[in-house]
Image (tube, coloured by chain):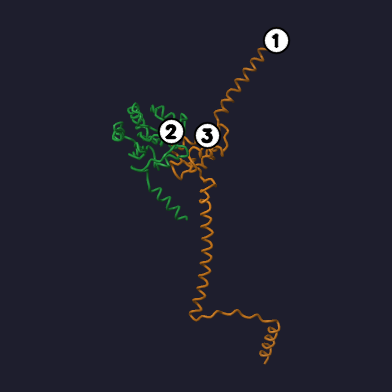
Chain colours: A orange, B green
Amino acid sequence: MVTEIKKTSWVAALSILLVVCLIPAAVYAQGSGPSDDEVNAVAKQLYCPVCENIPLDACGTTACEQWRGVIRDRLAEGWSEDQIKEYFVAQYGDRVLAEPPREGFNWVVYIVPMVIFVGGGVLFITGIKRWRDSGQDRTLRRGGKKVPEPDKLSDDDIKRVEEELLKRSKG
Amino acid sequence: MLLLFLTIGLIRSQKGQVSVGEIAPDFELISFAGESYQLSEYRGSVVVLNFWASWCDTCKPEAKDLEAAYQYYRSRGDVIFLGVDYVDTEPEALGYLEEFGVTYPNGPDLRTEISQAYRVGGVPETFIIDQDGLIAHVQIGPFRSLEDILLRIDPLLD
């Protein structure tokens, strides 16, 4: 009987010890939450409309601090980056995104620079070509002559020239 | 085409807030309590539309004055106060409303659509809309006192 009580006491003591050891671990896990780097990884993809052109991770205003707090809370709740970004868009509009979504009128943002780049390239090449052509025309107008490309000599002709030169050198 | 977009953008940015005499853009405000407020339903009443945010320090001094003005006109029933919470987070916004005892309807500016429609440049800004739905007064920055608010509303009432 005494042995059984002792056994029970040991089990109870061990259980209490286990619980005591686990509680701080649980509290620590709950308090740790997402790191600043994890929060900033999402924050740098967002812009606060109040402080334009400053990404959320680099913005020091109270509004931005609050937004980073929201990101931290959502990450702690297990939300993905996309879900958090969707939440911010629903709350504050598309302009919070670093890159506007590729849909509807927003395509203009992506297409116009490409059109300008390609159009500029075509204009540049065409301009260079015209400039070169007009340069040649100017030379001709001033009485200049195009230097004709030398005709290629056949092997027989080369042989004949060599023989002639040899004769002359001997003579 | 690019020039056209740039021109439109430039004109928009130069336009400033909606001005006195313009038709107040219609909107639907969903309050923090979940109730819907449609501006066009308040034709015949004066509407005081205040844009604010919990992070805005200059909004704080006028918060109590706006609430006092709301209480002053409340029994009349023809002066409506609506608060639009601009680019804010809900817990802080609710804390702000509690701190300053604001009881008239307030809600978030979802997708910043209302502030864009009124071309709000910052907070606080207040638009007083007359019974015909026209902008009667635009207050850039905070009201200085309760009297300052009443001075803008009283002339609109019979």
Task: Give the residue type that dot 1 points to.
Answer: Glu
What is the x, y in percent for residue A162?
68, 85
Q: Which mark is residue B37?
A: 2
Q: Are marks 2 and 1 on the same chain?
A: no
Q: Which residue is mark 1?
A: A4
Q: Which tag is nearer the camera, tag 3 or tag 1?
A: 3
What is the x, y in percent for residue A154?
69, 81
Task: Give the residue type that dot 2 points to.
Answer: Tyr
Instruction: Name the residue: 41% across, 27% down.
Output: B98
What is the x, y in percent for residue A46?
50, 41
Q: Which residue is mark 3?
A: A72
Foreground pick, A39 / B79:
B79
Foreground pick, A76 / A15:
A76
Task: Give the residue type that dot 3 points to.
Answer: Arg
Give the mark nearer the N terminus: 3 vs 1: 1
Foreground pick, A33 / A134:
A134
| Circle 1 crowding by C-alpha within 10 Å: few under 14, some 14–19, many from 20 | few
Quarter of image, res A75: top right
Q: Which mark is residue B2?
A: none
Quarter of image, res A62: top left
